[in-house]
């Protein structure tokens, strides 16, 4: 089968088989390939460009708020990983171990970092001496490795790509503020940049990060009603500082432990973009991270003047947009499908008749609306068209979430909803891990996050009917 | 000892002990720290910012010439690494082996990539089908691991950071052109962006990359006369294509093997910047990659109007430059030393008298020239001052190389020069690996590259006195 036939082949409908639809998009939009290492993916050029745009947007936000990038080693000595008990219990079962360098057996095993808390703590204990050295607001962009059993591109792979922020502060208040500020930064990134609405909340004890005092999370809902934990921000208190002896002398010359945070967003966010915005014709990308924002397709390009005008428009637009002019010998229909599959927000068609009318046709990816735009208005019109497009993506995702969100009034209703309705179910909870476990066992759903909603005396736990201590969003998750 | 005292402490003179001088700069400019993993470094914020600027400059050049980024897995299965014989012989002795995932022993060992030729080849054999798929011009920015015995920050570390380009072409001619084009791109990057003069040439058989037909190199000379191999570009012919079965159907529907290249520049370039431009007061950075291009130091900042004016200048300059305003409570003298240590190209001093005169003082890092600039001319003057500064760095490095470069007329002179004069020695060579080995044994020097110079009948090998086949630049190297 030729590449051309493959590309115009319809993909599985997302309502028919969501999982196959996802795989089809990953393959046909050329986002990733499986590699010769089981569970590790090859990130292909289009997805790498997408990831670089995600990175640049987040990185700008980090730097604007005073954070600095560093690069920590890929490896962690076994003894260092084992220093903090909860942390090692959480990660040791799923790390990859290096035992040999060349022909030589290492005197101590090294794990490939599954996350880098202990490396940052070790470094902070070296470089932090006085209050003048605080806060330390470090971040790194790296890959990490967790030896997962079953994997899916972008959602769960043995090697994945992320940023991990690690900060050290003089006081608990400052560290908690940082943890929460980053949660807001993440929420804004998902909502504004990716057009993905998120729910902010706190993880339960059983769902929080290994070693954290509190884990904050932003959760988003995919088209199939399942949750994607999209970004997390952890407050560590001084737990790691005590284990790693990270102390500073304050302005009164007293030795004090630092308080820390860590936080991360990963290449899972690409999976989120696919599953929130994509449709049966392929990807639908938010403009801020679309590797191609405008695809210019000449129509009847053999006719005099068409390619010349298309090139003129390309030159005009490329200053401010990521533009692709496709003047290959494929048919326009093939090109339309191709850039729809790739989720390009705007298609610009230009043919002999358009040139005669001194206009062009813009087609928005999400709703296929055809907008005829006089060429002299083109530059002026595009920002508004892209802004409305992003807003439609966001509104649609928010409406979808609303129509798949429920509040349970009774235990019966609670389990019925979780078992039979894809989506989020809000239900009050007593705070017991046993109740959480029961929900998971019976329905496969987990506590996504604890909300800020007030608990009244009438609220009871949806599982055990004892008095409730919080309201929780429950759902199945990726 | 307080941090303040540490920073104003003079570093070792580079003429006294070059190696200690290098270590002092790495430590005191806060470029890197040793980590808990022997031979792996922590890249601290200042060096990470420098590396990001190097990356962005090269990445722009790659993208402008049609290259795309991808991300390949961190691991290579042992059987895949072993497919190409020369390649595995070159790398297997120095790779780190992963043997366990969690508690489970892997059925096949994985090495942490020392370089990624085999991964790209494996992928190319999957995705290349027809002439329409060519050329493939891929690059990735990653870290690689080689289990070196002795290490030095940036110059030789077990984990290091680089870009590796891997391309596949329809014909040998196209692949050779790519290999050479990239060499020119690298030369331009080193000379224009880093102000480091380079010599372009070809590696000898013994020095070429494991698996390559031809290795091109750019070599630069450090202050101590030693060479740094700064970037290499390899032509592979169809050797890897035959082993990995990378074939395409051409326009006549014939199956053909692709021809390939690979090329890389690494975090060693940071070592090169230190050792080419640095002086006894610390780093001297080329403007294009300086994380701080202008440091604004208020003088007598407690006096009315000084901080306000300094902030005004900061706001004025930050649009077009990377500017740092240091209004901390340190003394101006401490700040002067600090930003000299960090190699900041321009220092801008602003105090009460300057404000009175409506001017400021600019001091260039390399020659400490004080330039009094009227404030209304500031924006207009800076580009020229930075341009001249870069040119001085380049000219100085080139003059230093010229004064440490020799041409040997006889075998006696050849060995005398290599043994007693730090620098490069040009000497004709018969092409035999035995002669190369003899030079290395007697002097520690290696063939840095074969030059383009014409060989005449009178030229004899500096080692064996047989007829020469080429002129070679010899030198000790990092």
Image: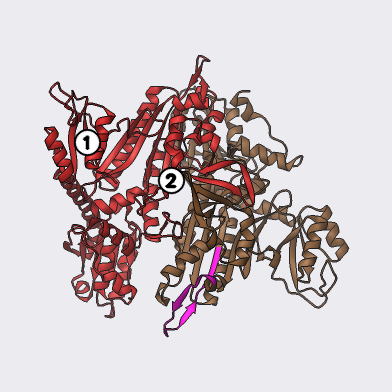
Chain colours: A red, B brown
How far across and down, in percent of the image, does residue A148 sit?
40, 48
- Quarter containing the N terminus of chain A: bottom left
How packed is label 1: few (under 14 Cα within 10 Å), some, or many (20 or more)? many
Q: Which mark is residue A190?
A: none
Magenta region: B243-262
Q: Which sits in the foreground, A48 or B116? A: B116
How far across and down, in percent of the image, does residue A287 sit?
28, 54
Q: Is residue A368 magenta?
A: no
Residue in the picture at 22% in, 36% down: A473
Task: Tell me the subunit letter for badge 1.
Answer: A
Q: Which mark is residue A473?
A: 1
Please tell me in which quadrant of the rendered image residue B129 appears.
bottom left
What element does badge 2 sit on? loop
Tell me if B439 is positioned left or right of A205 in this view: right
Residue in the picture at 28% in, 57% down: A22
Q: For marks 1 and 2, give the CA distance.
A: 27 Å
Residue in the picture at 64% in, 62% down: B89
How far across and down, in percent of the image, does residue B228 sit?
67, 54
Q: Which residue does the numbered mark 2 point to in the structure image?
A: A146
Task: Tell me the subunit letter for badge 2.
Answer: A
């Amino acid at each position: 089968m030729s590449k051309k036939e493959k590309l115009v082949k319809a993909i599985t409908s997302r309502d028919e088989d969501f999982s196959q639809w996802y795989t089809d998009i990953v393959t046909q939009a050329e986002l990733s390939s499986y590699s010769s290492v089981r569970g590790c993916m090859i990130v292909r050029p289009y997805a790498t460009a997408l990831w670089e745009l995600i990175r640049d947007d987040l990185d700008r936000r980090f730097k604007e708020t005073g954070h600095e990038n560093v690069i920590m080693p890929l490896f962690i000595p076994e003894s260092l990983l084992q220093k903090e008990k909860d942390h090692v219990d959480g990660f040791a079962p799923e790390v990859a171990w290096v035992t040999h360098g060349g022909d030589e057996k290492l005197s101590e095993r090294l794990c490939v970092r599954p996350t880098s808390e202990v490396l940052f703590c070790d470094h902070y204990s070296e470089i932090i001496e006085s209050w003048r050295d605080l806060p330390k607001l470090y971040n790194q962009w790296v890959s990490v490795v967790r030896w997962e059993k079953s994997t899916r591109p972008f959602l769960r792979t043995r090697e994945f790509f992320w940023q991990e922020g690690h900060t050290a502060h003089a006081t608990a208040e400052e560290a908690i503020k940082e943890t929460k500020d980053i949660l807001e930064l993440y929420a804004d990134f998902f909502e504004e940049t990716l057009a993905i609405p998120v729910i902010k909340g706190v993880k339960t004890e059983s769902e929080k990060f290994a070693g954290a005092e509190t884990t904050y999370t932003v959760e988003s809902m995919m088209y199939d009603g399942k949750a994607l934990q999209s970004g997390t921000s952890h407050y560590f208190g001084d737990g790691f500082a005590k284990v790693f002896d990270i102390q500073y002398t304050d302005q009164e010359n007293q030795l004090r432990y630092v308080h820390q945070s860590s936080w991360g967003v990963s290449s899972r966010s690409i999976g989120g973009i696919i599953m929130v915005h994509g449709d049966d014709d392929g990807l639908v990308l938010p403009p801020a991270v679309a590797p191609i924002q405008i695809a210019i397709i000449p129509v009847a390009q053999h006719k005099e003047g068409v390619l010349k005008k298309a090139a003129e428009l390309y030159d005009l637009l490329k200053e401010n947009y990521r533009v692709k002019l496709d003047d290959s010998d494929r048919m326009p229909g093939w090109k339309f499908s191709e850039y729809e599959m790739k989720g390009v927000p705007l298609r610009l068609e230009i043919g002999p008749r358009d040139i005669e009318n001194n206009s062009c046709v813009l087609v928005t990816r999400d709703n296929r609306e055809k907008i005829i735009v006089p060429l002299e208005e083109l530059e002026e019109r595009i920002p508004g068209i892209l802004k409305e497009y992003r807003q439609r993506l966001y509104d649609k995702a928010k409406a979808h979430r609303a129509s798949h969100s429920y509040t349970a009034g009774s235990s019966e209703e609670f389990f019925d909803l979780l078992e039979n309705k894809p989506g989020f179910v809000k239900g009050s909870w007593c705070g017991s891990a046993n109740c959480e476990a029961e929900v998971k066992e019976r329905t496969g759903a987990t506590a996504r996050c604890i909300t800020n909603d007030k608990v009244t005396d009438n609220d009871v736990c949806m599982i055990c009917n004892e008095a409730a201590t919080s309201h929780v969003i429950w759902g199945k998750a990726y």
